[in-house]
Amino acid sequence: AKSKQKVIALKTDIDTFHVHGREVYWLCRKKQSESTFSNAVLEKTLGKPSTIRGANTVKKIAEKYS
């Protein structure tokens, strides 16, 4: 619950987050390069290693294994 609150607190005008179990969903309303959010920020916030996958990567993985 604390980790979820920490991630939700990262919200900005550009970035919105949703946490579902171990998954964090990030909506970036502009180019990722215009956001202050990054994987390093997520790892520091959670205190754990993490990875970020873009929508295209997720689609490719789904196609590969479907």
Image: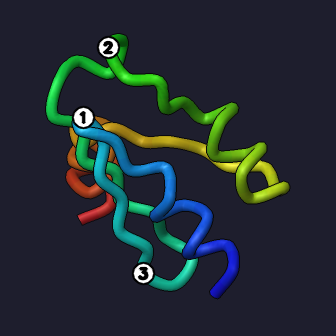
Give the left or right position of residue 65, taking residue 13 as reference: right
The disc, 3 or 1, on the residue closer to the chain's N-terminal end is: 1
Give the left or right position of residue 43, taking residue 56 as reference: right
Name the kind of residue labelled 2 in the image: Glu
User: Which is closer to the viewer, label 3 or label 2?
Assistant: 2
Confirm or deny contact between disc 3 and disc 1 (CB under 8 A). Answer: no
Give the left or right position of residue 35, taking residue 52 as reference: left
Name the kind of residue labelled 3 in the image: His
In the rendered image, residue 39, in percent from the top left (x then y), is placed at 60, 35
- In the picture shown, does residue 17 fall above or below 1? above
In the rendered image, residue 3, in percent from the top left (x then y), is placed at 67, 73
- In the picture shown, does residue 65 fall above or below 59? below
Confirm or deny contact between disc 1 and disc 2 (CB under 8 A). Answer: yes
Secondary element type, mark 2? helix
Q: How many marks?
A: 3
On residue 20, which mark appears?
A: 3
User: Which is closer to the viewer, label 3 or label 1?
Assistant: 1
On residue 14, which mark appears?
A: 1
Residue identifier under label 2: 34
